[in-house]
Image (cartoon, helix red, strand yellow):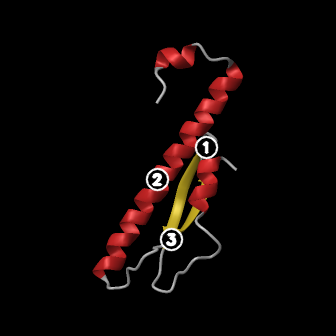
Amino acid sequence: MRTVEDLQSYGERELVEEIQVLERELLKERIERARDRWKIVAQENGWYFEPFYIHVWIKKDDHGHMVVSDSVAHKGMEDAGGDMIDELVKGE
């Protein structure tokens, strides 16, 4: 993680890129927290299995930051073409 001193030496473009990286990391963390919450629900109700998938809705908040707006999981949820968190981490 960069320090404030590191960021002060950045140009505008580098700073924007660094902020985007940090926002993707934060969003990934929030998705994982949603997965952890749904994992508990699934385990308590006997329908947890690996790999465990959830569906997450992401939107921009009033400040333009990407946030998890909602999430869902259910007993029959299966792989729908790959884990999108991998794409998020790549920044695509």
Place residue 22 in its image quadrant: top right
- Left or right position of 52 against 20: left
> Marks 2 and 3, Cα distance to the nearest angstrom?
12 Å
Do the numbered discs 2 and 3 sit on residues whose CB atoms are within 8 Å?
no
Q: Residue 78: x and y, percent?
A: 55, 80
Give whichever of discs 2 and 1 has the lower sequence position: 2
Q: Which residue is mark 2?
A: 30
Chain-order first, disc 2 or disc 3: 2
- Point 31% across, 78% down: residue: 43
Which element is circle 3 on?
loop
Q: What residue is drawn where x is 64% and y is 42%?
A: 64
Q: Residues within 10 Å of mark 3 (few under 14, many from 20)?
A: some
**Residue that label 1 marks:** 62
The reply to whether residue 50 is in sight is: yes
Q: Return the mark for residue 54.
A: 3
Decide: is 29 above or below 15.
Answer: below
Closer to the N terminus: mark 3 or mark 1?
Answer: 3
Task: Select label 3 or label 1 by which is in front.
Answer: 3
Tell me the crowding category of disc 2: few under 14, some 14 to 19, or many 20 or more residues within 10 angstroms, Cα based: some
Report x, y in % for residue 10.
Answer: 62, 17
Q: Nearer the viewer, residue 71 or 32?
A: 32
Q: Secondary structure at mark 1?
A: loop
Q: Amino acid at mark 3?
A: Ile
